[in-house]
Image (spheres, grey):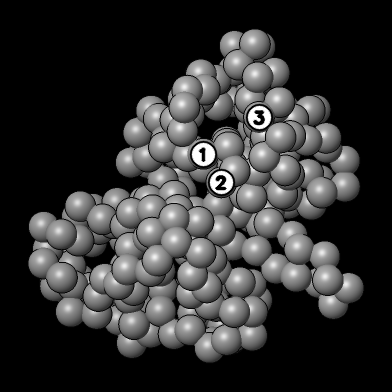
Amino acid sequence: MTPDRLHAVAFWARELKDAEIERACRGLVEKTWAPGATIVHRGDAFDYWTGVVSGLVKISSVSSSGKAVSLAGMPAGMWFGEGSMLKGERRQYDLVTLRESKLALMNRATFSWLFENSVGFNRFLVRQFNERLGQFIALVEHDRMLDGVARVARAIAWLFNPVLNPNIGPSLDISQEELGLIAGVSRQVANRALQILEAEGLLRAQVAELTPLDLKALSHYGE
C-alpha cells in the first residue's frame, strides 16, 4: 500500500510519523469479499487488524441456545479487531459482509510494531477503546431495555460515530434490510422506526440513503 492510499483509507494515519507510515504501508493489503460472505467465524484465528475500505460488514454472534445477536455494523472508514490483536486470542464474533466489501488487513507483526513504537498510534488506540467500550455498554442496555425504534436510532448513531469514523460524511448508503440486520430487528420494524425518527426530525430517510440530523438525540433515544 502506498502512503497516499493509506491516508485515503485510514484516518488514524494522520497520527503517524513518516517512518511509521512507511512501516504501516508494508504491512497492509486489501482484499474484496462478495455479499453475504463470512470473513471470520467465531473461534477462528484471524491475525489481521481490519479496516472497512468500502461496503458494509456486520459483527454478530450466536449463543449456545441459537440466539443470533447483532453487535455492530461497520461502514467504510471504521477499523476494528485491536482487542483480539493485543490479546492474541481467537475472534469472539462472526464477521459477515452485507454487500460487496473491500477490507484493509494489517498483519500482526506490523500492528505490534506500531503498538510498541508509535506514540500517535497508541493515542488513537486509547480513544478507540474508550469510545467502543461506551458503545458496547450501551448495547447491553439496547438488548434488555429498548424497543425497536430505539435500537434502530442507536444503531444509526453507531454508524455515524465521529470518533470511530471521522470521515463518514453526512449521509450513508444503506438499505432498510441492512439497517435491520445491524440493529437486530426485522426490515419492517426498521422501516417503521425510520418513519418515526424522520417525523421527529432526527433524520432524513431516502431510498437506500440515510442522513442523521441530530446524532446526539439518536444516540440517547429511548432514555
Of 9 and 187, the residue lying toward us:
187
Q: Position of residue 222 (x, y in %)?
A: 79, 28
Dividing the image into 4 quarters, which one contains the N terminus?
bottom left
Percent coordinates x, y for residue 125 in the rendering? 45, 62
Cα gap from disc 1 to disc 3, whole angstroms:
10 Å
Quarter of the view holding residue 129: bottom right
Distance between the alpha carbons at the discs numbered 1 and 2: 5 Å
167 to 110, vertically: above or below: above
Can you say which quadrant of the picture contains the C terminus?
Answer: top right
Question: Which element carries disc 2, helix, strand or loop?
Answer: helix
Q: Mark 2 belongs to which amino acid? A: Glu
Secondary structure under the numbered disc 1 in the rendered image: loop
- Figure check: 126 above or below 106: above
Closer to us: 145 or 110: 145
On screen, residue 125 above or below 108: above
Q: Can residue 200 be seen in this view?
A: yes
Distance from Cα at disc 2 to Cα at disc 3: 11 Å
Q: Where is residue 177 in the image (x, y as percent from the top left)?
A: 59, 43
Mark 1 and mark 2 in contact? Answer it, CB < 8 Å. yes
Find residue 175 and name its label. 1
Q: Is residue 110 left or right of residue 182?
A: left
Marking on residue 178: 2
Residues 113 and 215: in front is 215
At 44% across and 55% down in the image, what residue appears? Answer: 99
Residue type for callout 3: Asn
Q: Mark 3 points at which residue?
A: 191
Can residue 161 be seen in the rendering of this structure? no
Q: In this view, does 1 lie to the left or right of 197?
A: left
